[in-house]
Image (spheres, rainbow, N blue to C red):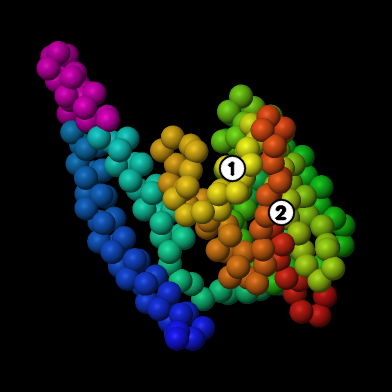
Amino acid sequence: MQTDGEGEKRLAWLGTLAGGLAHEIKNPLSTMAINLSLLHEDFARSEVTRDKRALRKIEVLQREVKRLERILADFLAYARGVELDRQPTDLAEKLSELLEFLEPELRAGRIVVHTHFEAGLPTALVDRNRLRQACLNLIVNARQAMPEGGELVVVTRRQGPRAVIEIIDNGCGMDEATRARCFDAYFSTKKGGSGLGLPTVRRIAEEHDGEVWVESEPQRGTRFVLSLPLALGD
């Protein structure tokens, strides 16, 4: 019978193995991307019909390479084992920084952002980079649910010994079947989606001894709730 310690060691080994494999795949992908870019420059200057057809094929290959790079990045974020660097963190401050970074993209997508940050909320004990990744994934998910624009609400609040982050959109929502599987690895309803964005959020929550859950209805929007431990002494 496998003990918890043995299971953790095996997961760490698998994460290291996956990370090494992904690294070996990433290098030739980068080389392909560079060479396709050079070919694109060469053929883009030509007025020959045959060269124009070749240019369109090169552009298809470039899109596929970019798609593979995104899948690889999502896989690494999900599979790699990390040692958390937990620090007392002001959630409102970090979320404000992330929203400021995403502001041009959200504005271009006609998405209006509302924030409701609880005053005096104690700091949360989190790995700031992992927290950023989780919140980024949730906001990207919300943006994709509102292709024609909409409203994004970001909330922080305290719930007992935990800090809570809510990411709420008024987009397309999910039916019961989709909602039940949205945290499953490689499950996606989006064309070209890797199916690892939300599973990565769940993994990050679990790494922090936290949890994440979702409420959603078709055509009425979605609410993701991320619960994290407060810093000791708060």
Give the quadrant of the N terminus: bottom left
Q: Earlier in the sequence, mark 1 or mark 2?
A: 1
Q: Which residues are magenta?
A: 42-60
Give the quadrant of the C terminus: bottom right
Report crowding for label 2: few under 14, some 14 to 19, many 20 or more residues within 10 A (C-alpha): some
**Residue under the image location 34 percent in, 66 percent down:** 18
Q: Is residue 73 left or right of residue 154?
A: left
In this view, the mark in front (1 or 2): 1
Q: Is residue 64 left or right of residue 90?
A: left
**Residue under the image location 25 percent in, 35 percent down:** 61
Among all residues in the image, which is located at the extreme right?
Answer: 119
Residue 10 in the image, given as x and y percentages of width and height: 40, 78
Element assignment for label 1: helix
Which residue lies under the disc numbered 2?
A: 225
Q: Is residue 195 magenta?
A: no
**Residue under the image location 14 percent in, 20 percent down:** 51
Report crowding for label 1: few under 14, some 14 to 19, many 20 or more residues within 10 A (C-alpha): few
Q: Amino acid at mark 1?
A: Ala
Q: Is residue 45 magenta?
A: yes
Which mark is drawn over residue 27?
Answer: none
Which residue lies under the disc numbered 1?
A: 177
